Image (spheres, rainbow, N blue to C red):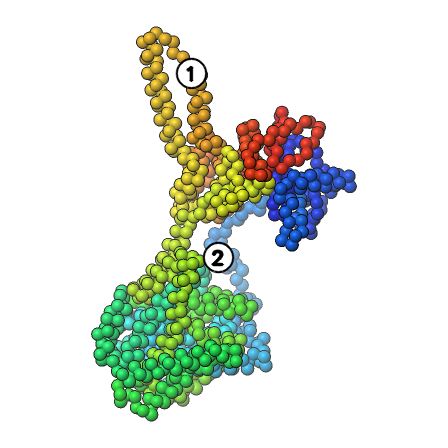
Amino acid sequence: MEDKIVDHIDSDSFTMHQCGKMNSAFEDISVYGSLDPLQEHKGSQTGTMLKSGEEKDALVASKEIRDANPLSGDSSQDGAPLKSFRIERPIYTQQSFQSVYKESPSEHISYIQRFVRKFKKCQCSGQCCTGCVTSTLPIIKWLPNYGVRKQLPGDIISGITVCAMNIPQGMAYALLASVPPVYGLYLSFFAPIVYALTGSAREIAVGTFAVISMMVSSAIERAVPQQASSDLNPSDIMNGTSGNTTAIPGTSGREGELVLAAVSLAFLVGLIQLSMYILRLGWVTIYLSDPFIRGYTTGAAIHVFTSQVDDLLGIDIPRYSGVFKLIYVYRDIVLNLKYSNYVTILLSISCITVLIIIKLIEGKFSKQLRGYPLGAELIVVILGALASHLIGLEDYGVDIIGDIPTGLPAPKLPSTTYMGSLVTDAIAIAIVVFAISVSMAALFGQKNNYKVDANQELVAYGCTNTITSFFSCYPSSCSLSRSLVQENSGGSSQIAGLVNSVLMLVILLFLAPLFEPLPKAVLASVIVVALKGMFKQFMDLKKLWKYDKIDFNVWWVTCLGVFLFDVDLGLMIGVGFSIFVMIWRTQEPYCCLLGRIPGTDIYKDITHVPSAKEIPGIKIFRMMSSLYYANVDHFKKSLHKLTKINPRKILQARAQRAFLKEMEEKKRQKEDKVNGNICQKSEQDSDIDRKIEEEELGGIHAIILDCSSLNFVDSSGLTRLIQIINAYKKIGVKILMAQVKKRVRDTISKSEFYSQVNLDGQSLLFVTIHDAVLYVVKESDLNELLVDDTDGRARTHIHTVIEGQRVPPDVNAIRVNETEQDTAF
């Protein structure tokens, strides 16, 4: 008769009994006791229902089992007794399980087949074209459902508030990007319009951003030589003087070259982002972890702060790029401190003080303000421009913005002069823009219960940067501060961005010249105060050191790399180190031995759960990772170390003993021949050898590999697994694999695994750890097997099953029949 397992279940605990010849009214599974709705089944899925008399006998047997089971007396947290069930099923190897419960065959679909299928689905129908347009331009889908009365007032207020921040930040971040301030206003006007048409996030404020402006400055300063090869005609940047377009004076020479490079960079960034969308590369941001992004932005904040020191002090220092740039900059700052302009320093201190005071008031009265900012930056900018105009700060040596033309730039194709030298920087900027923006959009989407399509965001930012580059704009990004203000001030859609653009248009057409006397020190103060949040990220180090030291290392390595090697090389260093850490985590994963909780079929790490006891004669090994080329050696070493069985050393010791034994035998034969004695072989030799071999193995005759953590096994891992199984087989230790996932089993089936280990799935792969344990126990000598008692002591239980009688169940009994041995746990 087929061997069966009978499980006695107390809540989440199982007591497994292997029963031999047991009379049962069940076909496959028998359940005794109270049933919840999830355990009520009918027909062949549960077996036949018990008659009244059989049910009574079963309930009595279940009560006896609960009385014998030490766990059955436990109570739940509310004090109610835990339910107890009894389940009977066979011991399942993976092969026998699949013979009863068929698995759906896994179909491998290549990328070419996927492309062909999608191409066949593409039909040039009206519905398909409409879907394509609405997916590319989400505004067509959400605008008809826009609530004018409910949403429009909040969007108008939000747009006005964001525009008040856009004016100072746009000009300040443009200077940070090494282009004239008016280009920041251009970007603040054009970018929200394009994103409103193509973006899927509702609260995102697109335009200038400090980190991206700094990356743009680093890229174009490196691409454009310090001395421009030839003067650039202003008409190369702005075409025509009629209507609302005018030529920008003062953009000749290197300044004009920097503008051309920034515009070309925006075009490249847009093309790269659109290419990422076509290739569906939105997943690349998964390698940009939060510690990496925060470390990177903190390092970038140091660069941003350093770039504003000369404007804060009123000194002129040369610009550097490349490795150790900041060290050279601070050296020049120290050497030029004696040339500082004291009026500029006083103005900077005053602006920073006013900004901090207003920010503190905002924080203290945030509930009363209901998320509406006081417009600290705009207040400081207006006061600074007014003071400069009335006092004449330019006469005291204070640098001012200068000429700001009215009107809009004429559309023009970006120059290709510097595109070749900007490709690498464009890739870095495209990825950073996408990572920061998608993270912010996902945060808002989760908060307001809507889905953000990462690939659609690639389309949105790709279109935004590509289209705005035709209007003399540098790369745009999501602004963290303005996005938070837009959401807190009532913005619920991209209509707020369009309101912002309308107001920016009014400023560009009529009010821009009012900001001409604005001192650069005021804009530098705005930037420095805005960096406060990024510098607070240094507090992350304390938390990361406490929670995860690996993420701590990612943070400071990325930040230090950006600080020392500039933002582009720092980005590569941070990404490279993050990938290295990810590989290192799986290269030396945690390995442990498992033990059984007495009276259950639960197996836990014996290091962390002292109640888990190892089963004598069996080692259960688990590695918490997939098995691939980088960790195969660690897998092998950990297996040898934890099981304390090294096949190579044991085989060497056996070979050495055999050699010494052979030499002694030859020597003894010679002596017996000389003495005329008859050579007799000791009868105890074989027994001694057997005992020595048993001592070498520590009584272990089987190792079970818990494969539940193995998501995949590559060719290197498969080869090493074959070697391990064969090596242990040579010393008499059987290897079994339990809880093997289908993907791993498919890999094994496709290879010559079974033939190389000279085993089949019937004796190698098992559904659960407990199935493998029971199989080993069944195949072993039960008279020598030690089983855990419920009180933790090891003892041997041997009972005789008399044919035709039923022995009362014992949770730790091993029942032996003359013809069939059955083991119960």
Q: Residue furthest bottom?
A: 390
Q: Residue at x 45, y 38 (%)?
A: 643
Quadrant of the drawing holding the N terminus: top right
Is residue 92 among the parts visible in the rendering?
no
The percent coordinates of residue 50 (x first, y second) are 74, 41
Q: Position of residue 825 (x, y in %)?
A: 60, 37
Is residue 120 shown left or right of residue 48?
Answer: left
Give amino acid for label 1. Ser
What secondary structure is marked by label 1?
Answer: loop
Q: Quadrant of residue 533?
A: bottom left
Mark 1 vs mark 2: give the one in front.
Answer: 1
Q: Which residue is mark 1?
A: 682
Q: Mark number for residue 115? A: 2
The residue sitting at 40% across, 79% down in the picture is 356
User: Looking at the image, which is closer to me, 185 or 580?
Assistant: 580
The quarter holding residue 179 reads bottom left
Q: In this image, 401 relative to 55: left or right?
A: left
Can residue 479 be seen in this snapshot? yes
Q: Position of residue 454 (x, y in %)?
A: 48, 65
Residues at discs 1 and 2 in contact (Cβ within 8 Å):
no
